[in-house]
Image (spheres, grey):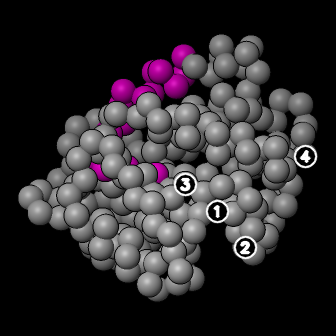
């Protein structure tokens, strides 16, 4: 990218859209430090099983995990390249999907206390895909526990992400629709995406590849 390249890049999107894979690729190509979201949440099994109170326990655990990982970056500009596979705000996206109004009244003050201590990315890459495409990728990956993700829940997550990023203005933002491409399995798709990321990104921009 001409000029000063972004120091802090975050890749976001719903489950199995490819955000961790893209973050790894970008870290390798830039020599940046890779931050992968913690996934060792002991309350997830109970959450997927629908146990009462498990959603709140899982959400508070994630909130503190994400804070502990991102807070050492500080609230100001970074002097090293960092590539993360999530933004801190994703915690609130899922809180509003999974928690009751009473639970949100407890959750929100903690989130508002922690959020100002987290640095904002210079660039966010938001990967989109339709629920049907994400379901195919879930089945292909076949991770334990993910079979319990219902089509209804998957649709809610996609809608919540779109709603959040439609209004997002805190960082430069590239929205990438991945429904017709597979940059993990197809080298041509990956190279085309990398070429797009070499171009300057200012404000909110869209990349809508058609694939093969």
**Crowding near pointer 4: few (<14 within 10 Å), some, many (20+)?**
few
Residue range of the region highlighted in magenta in the rendering = 109-126
Judge whether 202 appears above or below 28 on screen: above
Answer whether residue 41 is visible to the viewer in this image: yes
Give the label on residue 128, or none.
3
Query: Observer-nearest residue: 122 or 40?
Result: 122
Q: Is residue 69 visible?
A: no
The residue to which callout 1 is attached is: 16
Q: Quick check: 151 left or right of 160?
A: right
Quarter where residue 145 is shown: bottom right
Residue 122 horizontal/vertical position (percent)? 27, 47
Place of residue 110 in the rendered image (x, y in percent of width and height, measured from the top left): 54, 22
- Secondary-structure class at tag 2: helix
Mark 1 burial class by Cα count in 10 Å: few <14, some 14-19, many 20+? some
> Which image quarter: residue 106?
top right
Q: Which residue is mark 2?
A: 141
Q: What whole-number distance in Å separates the C-alpha atoms at marks 2 and 4?
A: 20 Å
- Helix, strand or loop status at disc 4: loop
């Amino acid at each position: 990218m001409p000029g000063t390249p972004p120091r802090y890049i975050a890749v976001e999107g719903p489950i199995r859209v490819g955000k961790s894979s893209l973050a790894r690729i970008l870290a390798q190509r830039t020599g940046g430090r890779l931050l992968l979201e913690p996934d060792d949440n002991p309350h997830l099994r109970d959450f997927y099983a629908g146990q009462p109170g498990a959603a709140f326990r899982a959400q508070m655990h994630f909130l503190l995990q994400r804070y502990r990982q991102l807070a050492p970056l500080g609230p100001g500009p970074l002097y090293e390249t960092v590539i993360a596979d999530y933004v801190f705000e994703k915690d609130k996206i899922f809180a509003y999907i999974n928690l009751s109004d009473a639970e949100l009244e407890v959750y929100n003050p903690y989130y508002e206390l922690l959020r100002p201590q987290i640095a904002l990315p210079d660039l966010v890459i938001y990967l989109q895909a339709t629920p049907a495409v994400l379901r195919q990728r879930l089945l292909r990956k076949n991770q334990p526990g993910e079979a319990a993700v219902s089509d209804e829940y998957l649709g809610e997550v996609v809608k919540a992400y779109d709603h959040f990023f439609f209004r997002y203005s805190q960082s430069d933002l590239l929205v990438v629709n991945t429904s017709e491409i597979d940059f993990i399995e197809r080298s041509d798709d990956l190279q085309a995406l990398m070429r797009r990321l070499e171009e300057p990104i200012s404000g909110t921009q869209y990349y809508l590849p058609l694939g093969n």
